[in-house]
Structures are given as C-alpha cells and as structure tokens.
Amino acid sequence: MSQPKHIAIIGAGIAGAACAAALTHAGHNVSLFEKSRGAGGRMSTRRGDGWQCDHGAQYFRARDPLFKAEVEAWERAGVVAPWGGRIAVVGTSTQPSPDAHLKRYVGTPTMTAPARHAARQANLLTSHTITKIACNDAGWQLSRAETGVLPTRFNGVIVATPAPQAVPLLAPVAPDLAALARQTEMLPCWALMLRYDTPVDLPFDGAFISEGPLGWVARDNSKPGRTGPETWLVHANARWSEDHIESTAEDVIAELQAAFMQLGAPAPNHASAHRWRYADVAPVSLPGYCWNPTLGLGVCGDWLNGGKVEGAWLSGHKLAEAIVLK
C-alpha cells in the first residue's frame, strides 16, 4: 500500500464517490468536491412539495463480480433495492435485452442514495465549482469559482467529471488526458417530469420507446421506497435531444408531453423539464481510468468505461486500487 495521502476528487457522481470510498478505506484523506448541493451526479432525483422523481439514471444492473459484491453490500445497507416493474418495448423494435435475466436496481429512497452512501466517509464539499488545478513543489492547488484559490494543498488530484467538463481542468496540466477527454462524444438528454393527481392507466411501469422523440418512460412511484403522488419520467432519445439542445423548456415540455399522451396517458397536472447536456457516452474503447503517478493526477468516470452506473463505479474503484498499490 502507498503512504497515506491527502487527495482531492473533483466530482461526486458515482465514479468520484466510489473512488473516494476505496481511498478512504485504504487510509487516505479524501476531499470530495461537488459543484451541486449533494453527491450523485446523474444518479439524481428532483424533489418538490410532496413529490420526487428520478430524472437522470433510471436503474442499473450488475454484471462484474466486484460491482455485484458492492450492490449486495448496498442492498444490505438499505440504499438500493431491486425494481420489479413491468417493462415493455413500444414501437417497431422487438429486440430483447441481452441481459434481460439480470435484476434492475434503483437507489432507495432516491437514486442519489448509493453515491451518498459511498461518499459518507470522505470530506464532501458541496457547492464547490472547481475551475482550475495547478501543481508545484508544495503540491496540488485548486481554484473555486465561488471563492478563488483554496488554501489546502493536496498530494494528488482526481478529475471525476463528464469528459467535456474535464477538458479545461486537464488541458493546462496534462494535455494528453485532455485530448482523451476531448475526443469523447457525450450525448444529451431532455428529461420531463410529470405529476398526476390520480393513477395513470398504462400497461407498463417502464418502457423503451423506439419511435418518435421518446426513448424511455417510467412510472417513478412504482420503484421501491418511493412515496408521494403518481409521477412519470419521460426521457427524449439522444438524437431528438441533440436537435433540441437549445430549445426552451416550455417547447420541450409541449412536444414531449404530447408524445407521452400518444401512448395513452392523460394530460398531467404539472410538468417540468431538465436538460442533461452530458447524459450518456457514445460507444468507444477507452482504458477505464487513467492514473499518472509522477504527476499524482488521475481521471475516472463512466465515459472512460462504457457508460452506465456499473462502468462509472468500476472506473472510480479501479483507479483507487491503482493508487493504493503504487
């Protein structure tokens, strides 16, 4: 094992949280910086007055033995549970999922729960937008948009943000890693959250949509641990989202709501939209994670490991293993 270090991790999504958990377990001091109000990244839940809706990642599966073991630990801790919702395919595609036999898991009581659980032993600093990293003989120094240069010096830095957000951080200090991030195509997604006063009579709890602007719809309150009124999540597909990336929320709501109603749903009592600029990653072969021991600089995230929750967790966890073994 390496000597204990003080390591800064930028980004508290599941990759950053997994890396923080493994490094903390190995005895390192970890400061986990997150620009939003809590851990989770795209494993995210929107909350309102008496309602909630998972508007990012909808569920995840476990194939890798390491991740299976972690999910089992999460299940024992009560932060995930299997979702046995009725899943359908709507449209011309009838191709079954190649992993249809695997359980679908969700965070409980919200999708943020696994990341919050993983990050709990690190020093989580929210509302910290890190805009610059620099290194000299005294160590790594970070700059925050809200307050400027932070006084703490670190032995190492890990960038665990989406690829486009990693580029400006990496470019001045590691052009090769910045180039890797720059060449990665991340795909957007518009999300629509719909609330109803009464149950919606549709023959599924989640459905993949292969026609029109939609890609996925789900009855959020069918997931374990959810409370509150009938709430549906609607995701536009990547192509439609790309074509409408700069559309107003009002226009997006109108078009996606109309498409959902064509599936047989009534008009909602309330609708809101969220734009994910970096929701998924285009298929590409990348190394899983990157670690430069000379610089003390690492990069992890789903974009380095095939996308999805499992890929993100494995990226962060295996980066931590590489650091611990140095």
Image (cartoon, helix red, strand yellow):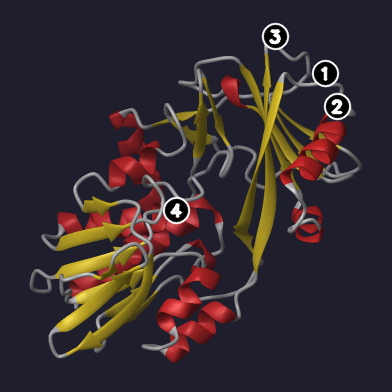
Q: Secondary structure at mark 3?
A: loop
Query: Mark 1 and mark 4: span between their CA atoms?
Result: 40 Å
**In terms of sequence position, does the residue under pointer 2 or pointer 3 come before the other?**
3
**Is disc 4 surrounded by few (<14), some (14 to 19) or many (20+) residues within 10 Å?**
few
Q: CA distance from mark 2 to mark 4?
A: 38 Å
Mark 2 to mark 3 CA distance (whole Å): 15 Å
Residue located farthest toward the left when viewing the structure as drawn = 3
Judged left or right of residue 153, residue 182 is right
Of tags 2 and 4, the one toward the viewer is: 2
The residue beneath circle 3 is 198
Q: If you read the primary sequence from the N terminus, does the residue marked by circle 2 or circle 4 appear first?
A: 4
Q: Give the residue number, with chain letter if any, for mark 1.
A: 266
Quarter of the image for the N terminus: give it. bottom left
Query: Residue 176 location in percent, x, y?
Result: 46, 90
Q: Are marks 1 and 2 in contact (CB under 8 Å)?
A: yes
**Label 2: how many Cα within 10 Å (few below 14, some 14–19, many 20+):** few
Front-most of residues 111 and 136: 136
Task: Kindly tell me whether residue 139 is visible in this rendering.
Answer: yes
**Are discs 3 and 1 less than 8 Å apart at CB?**
no
In the image, what residue type sits under mark 1?
Pro
Identify the residue at horizontal 74%, vertical 58% (top origin). Answer: 246
Quadrant of res 216: top right
Mark 1 or mark 3, which is nearer the start of the sequence? 3
Which numbered mark, 1 or 4, is in the foreground of this view? 1
Image vertical order of residue 210 relative to residue 64, above or below: above
- Image coordinates of residue 292 in percent, x first then y, are 31, 84
Residue underneath mark 4: 64
Residue at numbered disc 2: 261
| Badge 3 amino acid | Thr
